[in-house]
Image (cartoon, rainbow, N blue to C red):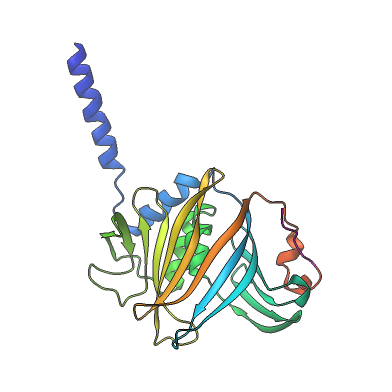
């Protein structure tokens, strides 16, 4: 075989492989997201968050949140000075709110932002598939869109349907960028949440800004700073019983 034929054969082979690797459904997408980053995604992270609430009268409320995560499934948020004992804990599908170190709310909860923005890259795709199905996302509905100048995969809705619970994933880097879901405090309100400003973190990524939109209005935003990965964290800080006494220190 001469050189030109060898080159042509190689090109055709690569094209065939690329075609075979095309993502055609939600299960393949979630598996691909896991496989792309399973060996490189960080397992712990900490950051400082500027949380801004945009009120209907035009005023804003700004708080500082200190967050620590252990993946998959755990996120601790201290609101304001740690000594005040205010914050909340997401741990393995359970949500607990603390005021002055005391529990005020405790209930089961799956946070789709934690699941799709972080856990999906660290846990078996079968676990993610099961959780999403239990959360009411129709995994049989799958299509592609262009959004903000980039191609994305959409799971949970047919083309043109923005009223169904769904999530969007950037096609190139397989990063979660958008979710539509009912607001938990008022299911009649539909939230359109964006993960934006992706930055490299170790060998993976983190979205340094999160925006929550309701009826095309920005109602809440998160801006991350002082971001660190692979931080040594004491498992006790994710234990609801030790929230008031176990703390983490900024790197």
> Residue at coordinates 44% horizontally, 62% vertically from top-left?
195
Residue 78 versus residue 26: which sits nearer the camera?
78
> Residue at coordinates 35% horizontally, 70% vertically from top-left?
138
Residue 233 found in image quarter: bottom right
Q: Is residue 42 magenta?
A: no
Q: Position of residue 243 (x, y in %)?
A: 75, 72
Q: Which residues are magenta?
A: 246-251
Q: Is residue 116 visible?
A: yes
Q: Is residue 30 above or below residue 161?
A: above
Residue at the outermost top position: 2
> Residue at coordinates 63% horizontally, 52% vertically from top-left?
228
Q: Position of residue 92 (x, y in %)?
A: 61, 67
Residue 13 versus residue 224: which sits nearer the camera?
224
> Residue at coordinates 18% horizontally, 17% vertically from top-left?
5
Residue 124 versus residue 216: which sits nearer the camera?
216
Residue 197 found in image quarter: bottom left
Image check: 168 left or right of 121? left
Query: Is most of the magenta stretch helix, strand or loop?
Result: loop
In the rendered image, the quadrant that contains the N terminus is top left
Q: Position of residue 66 (x, y in %)?
A: 66, 66
Q: Is residue 247 magenta?
A: yes
């Amino acid at each position: 075989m001469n050189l030109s034929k060898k080159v042509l054969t190689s090109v055709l082979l690569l094209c065939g492989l690329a075609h075979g690797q095309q993502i055609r459904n939600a299960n393949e997408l979630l598996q691909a997201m896991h496989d792309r980053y399973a060996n490189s995604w960080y397992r712990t992270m900490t950051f400082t968050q500027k949380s801004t609430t945009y009120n209907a009268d035009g005023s804003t409320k700004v708080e500082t949140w200190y967050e620590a995560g252990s993946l998959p499934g755990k996120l601790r948020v201290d609101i304001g000075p740690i000594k005040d004992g205010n914050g909340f804990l997401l741990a393995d599908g359970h949500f607990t709110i603390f005021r002055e170190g005391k529990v005020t709310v405790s209930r089961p909860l799956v946070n789709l932002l934690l699941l799709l923005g972080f856990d999906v890259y660290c846990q078996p795709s079968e676990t993610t598939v099961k959780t999403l199905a239990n959360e009411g996302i129709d995994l049989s509905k799958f299509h592609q869109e262009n959004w903000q100048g980039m191609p994305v995969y959409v799971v949970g809705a047919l083309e043109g349907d923005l009223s169904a619970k769904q999530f969007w994933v950037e096609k190139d880097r397989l990063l979660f960028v958008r979710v539509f879901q009912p607001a938990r405090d008022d299911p009649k309100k539909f939230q359109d949440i964006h993960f934006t400003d992706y930055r490299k973190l170790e060998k993976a990524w983190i979205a340094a800004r999160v925006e929550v939109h309701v009826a095309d209005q920005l109602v809440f935003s998160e801006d991350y700073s002082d971001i660190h990965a692979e931080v040594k964290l004491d498992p006790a800080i994710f234990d609801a019983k030790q929230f008031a006494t176990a703390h983490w220190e900024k790197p």
